[in-house]
Image: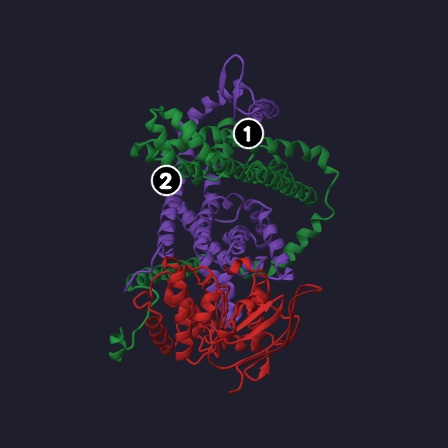
Chain colours: A purple, B green, C red
Amino acid sequence: MAALSTAAGRVALRPSVWARVGWVLLAVYVVYALGRLDFSWPRFVTGLDNGARFFARMLPPRVAQPDSLLQGLTESLEIAILASCIGILLSLPIGLLAARNLMPAWASWPARALIAATRSFHPVIVAIIFVKAVGFGALAGIGALVVGSVGFIGKLFAEAIEEISLKQVEAIRATGAPFMNVITYGVMPQVFGRFIGFATYQLDSNLRNSTMVGIVGAGGIGGTLFSAFQRFDYDFVAAILLSIIAMIMVGEVLAAWVRGVFLEKGKVEEE
Amino acid sequence: MNAALDHAQTRTWRRFSPRQRLARFTIYFVIVAAIVASARSVEVIPEFLYDAPEQVRDLLQRMWPIAWSHYPGGVHDALMETLHIATLGTILAIAMALPIGLAAAHNVVPSRTINYLAKLVLVASRSVNSLVWALLFVAVFGPGALAGTLAIAFRSIGFVGKLVGEALEEADRGTIEALEATGASWSAQLAWGYWPQVQPAFWSVALFRWDINVRESAVLGLVGAGGIGMALDTALNLFQWNRVAMVLFSIFAVVVVAEIVVTQIRDRIL
Amino acid sequence: MSAALILRGLVKEYVRGKRVLDGISLAFDPAGMTAVIGPSGTGKSTLLRCVNRLVEPTAGEIIFGGRDIAPLKGRALREARRQIGMVFQEYNLVERLTVMENLLSGRLGYVPAHKAWLRRFPQEDVDRAFALLDQVGLTGLANQRADALSGGQRQRVGIARAVMQNPKLLLADEPTSSLDPKTSVEIMALMREVGRQHSIPVIVNMHDVELARRFADRIIGMSGGRVVFDGAPVGLTDDVLKTIYGGESWLH
């Protein structure tokens, strides 16, 4: 922002021209896109009316099939737990291999390619492929989420390793320590905190995704939800949504607790 | 100084205090128990598992050759629609998320109740997948891109709102206090004190979310909410694997292009 | 007294044709402190780092423990490195670990991977660590995180870590360059004391000539990748310093 002084008087600030242009372009785009999407006010208003009626049918939430609900939730939980554990375990070596500052090119490039490939597709699409490969059910869901987890944690883990101070690693190497010890003492302490952060985030993310892969048949509460929709059982839908939200909130609290225990901020406690 | 050595008593060293060890052990135990319980009740039908490589091979064979000719008619328009859904959805989400994010930041809105409610809204938004939001909006507004756009928007509110709220809470207090001292109004403090500090984080979050939304928008069509997902759904239902491959390829291409665009913008602006 | 370390014709070229070390030949006794001085970029650090192979020499022999360690690789190299302790200019401690863990990391060449991960070191290592902590004046700080310490304290931990290896040789690469004058003197005194007590020869490279004069038994002056002075501190006259550093203005 530049200060101007003109003959007529002082103008205190003039916002940059580029910002103005940017906002105008944005507005133009919004109008254009709305047109392409067939957006029209009458349709929107009808929709709102629909929405009100829809909302009314959702309340009060009713647990129409408690067994089905419980089973679906448990299955989603199991999918999330197993997928996260397998994903975390796999992404440790893969992420390490992908770190260009520690690994030679013949190791890091395949690892980076693998990580990029696993991130290319939405978990639902991967789930569809797994359903074709291993059949309907939780196994497909676990497989799909493992792929997603490796992509997410692997990428961030490799980036974290690439940011460490190599001086600490050099010192450990100078003591004659073998490779694994160098990793354990030189690399891991520097990245462990961030790794726990990614891992717990991915656990939450898997918990959310596990509620959805059921829509394509890969197990979990998603299937229950989808069939409730198709039966127009909207009050059951509301109950399912609320229980999903509750489960995820509990998951976030647990994740925060695990983070608290593993991340020693500051001094180690004296005995 | 050498009193300890004179004692001829070995000093032991433990990495963690007893309380820490207990907490860590509990967590390990719970994790292992959860894994064992989960693994036992997940149904693994061995025949399906052994069959898997064969199935995948079969799938890949059916997908080849990719139906390139399908692109102009069946894919291109849907792909563009997907991009519009993602972009409009992100813009709408940002517009809705900003006020909520402000309300969630304690140093901007000092009322704990409002903070809590805003955070609740954000958590609820995040907990429901865009796919599930899409189901909801398809039921309300009927199939089509409108449902998709709203689904993307409502899902993203939580993401953008949470990160913006956190960025606000981490803003430097000193600048704000200085503004307060000059008697600036609340909105002036926002514009001059908070916005400049939060701005880089904001754009970063917006770009990040747009990138994710491009991926998300691609699958919404599976439940009828518009975009390339609908082409995918049609092809899957008709078992036209060559077309499925075409759709998957174009989704992949769009995602890669979006990543490149985002990286370029990031390098230039941030 | 047989030599602890012999260098023969040591050459290092980072860029082809440009020799940072131009055929260095030196022998080091198994006791005492040697200071290597010289202008920046003259290869002092490179010389030290060639000994423990943190830098790969281009040519030459490094006779240590009775054999040439220059061509060693893999396990043999690690075993040789166990015998050589190094103290770094920026301490190079693992910041997030405690003092005790940093000390014990000196034994990582001897402890298998799973035990190292579980922090199960032999009790005698732990005893030794506590004793060394006392000796370097850091009693009671065993559970402090390394990044909570001052510069001088960190370097003491660095010295203790190197001594934990039970080395036959101690290298120090500009150990006092990041410290204030008072602490520098303390660290140099500590290194000399530790070297004497545990019978380890110490080779220090530094740019503070006065410190070198005060603490070293032998001074090696380098210039342009070659040794231009090798003798007792008393022989370090102004003329000699001029040959090493060039120019007079800095002397006054």
Where is residue B248? Give x, y as percent.
65, 43
Residue at x 54% of width, y 28% of height: B146
Residue B235, position as x, y percentages in the image: 65, 40
Question: Local crowd at mark 2 within 10 Å, few (<14), some, or many (≥20)?
Answer: some
Q: Which mark is drawn over residue C169? A: none
Element at label 1: helix
**Disc 1: which residue:** B88
Residue C147 shows up from this direction: yes
At x 71%, y 37%, the residue is: B71
Q: Is residue B229 above or below residue A36?
A: below
Front residue (pair C171, C41):
C41
Subunit bearing disc 2: A
Between A25 and C86, the residue placed more toward the observer is C86
Residue C175 left/right relative to C8: left
Q: Amino acid at mark 2?
A: Val
Q: Secondary structure at mark 2?
A: loop
**Residue at mark 2:** A63
Question: How far apart are the alpha carbons under marks 1 and 2?
Answer: 35 Å
